[in-house]
């Protein structure tokens, strides 16, 4: 048996604003959009691969998303951590930690919170990505 992480879905308070962030700022394009009773959804995936992300806006819910304590953070691999961090801050996201090169691993990392409060970690690998993880530099 083979299992592969295919897609995950997160709730958002405003689907269009979330798409503007994930597609317009981060650069992960929308692959499809759909509406089902009470919910608007969009699926995004990088042309370079990786898992798909589904954004879902429940139309009967207003205000911030109650995330509880189950979800810690979302990872985004990038070929330029500092530039992506700057774009996110310019788009109105909250800075949690500016880009810094880590001593323990050969990466530069930065953290922001998006408009719904999700913690997003930007990771730039300096010596290639782990096996099975697409390297953004291969698609420049």
Image (spheres, grey):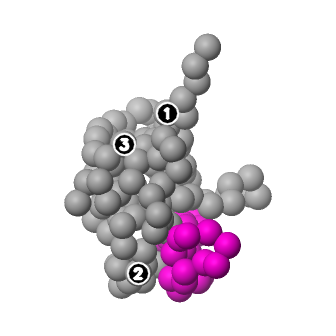
Q: Nearer the viewer, mark 2 or mark 1?
A: 2
Local crowd size for mark 3, using a 10 Å CA cut-off: few (<14), some (14–19), many (≥20): few
Quadrant of the image containing the C terminus: bottom left
Sequence-wise first label, 2 or 1: 1
Q: What SS does tag 2 mark?
A: helix
Q: What SS does tag 1 mark?
A: loop
Give the prevailing secondary structure in the magenta stretch: strand
Residue found 55% across the figure and 34% down from its top: 5
On screen, residue 82 above or below 39: below
Residue 3, by quadrant, is: top right
Quadrant of the image containing the N terminus: top right
Nearest to the observer: residue 37 or residue 68: 68
Residue segment shown in magenta = 95-121
Q: Residue furthest left?
A: 140
CA gap between label 2 and label 3 equals 22 Å
Q: Residue furthest top?
A: 1
Q: Nearer the viewer, mark 3 or mark 1?
A: 3
Question: Was residue 15 drawn as part of the magenta stretch in this picture?
Answer: no
Q: Residue furthest front?
A: 127
Instruction: Identify residue for label 2.
Output: 82
Q: Which mark, residue 49? A: 3
Q: What x and y, as percent, mark residue 99? A: 51, 82
Q: Which mark, residue 6? A: 1
């Amino acid at each position: 048996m083979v299992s592969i992480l295919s897609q995950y879905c997160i709730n958002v308070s405003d689907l269009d604003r979330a798409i503007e962030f994930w597609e317009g700022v981060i650069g992960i394009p929308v692959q499809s959009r759909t509406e089902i009773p009470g919910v608007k959804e969009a699926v995004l995936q990088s042309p370079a691969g990786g898992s798909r992300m589904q954004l879902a806006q429940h139309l009967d819910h207003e205000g911030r998303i109650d995330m509880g304590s189950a979800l810690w953070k979302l990872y985004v691999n990038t070929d330029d951590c500092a530039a992506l961090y700057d774009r996110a801050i310019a788009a109105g996201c909250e800075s949690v930690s500016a880009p810094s090169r880590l001593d323990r691993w050969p990466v530069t990392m930065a953290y922001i919170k998006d408009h719904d409060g999700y913690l997003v970690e930007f990771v730039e690998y300096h010596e290639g990505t782990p096996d099975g993880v697409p390297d953004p530099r291969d698609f420049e």
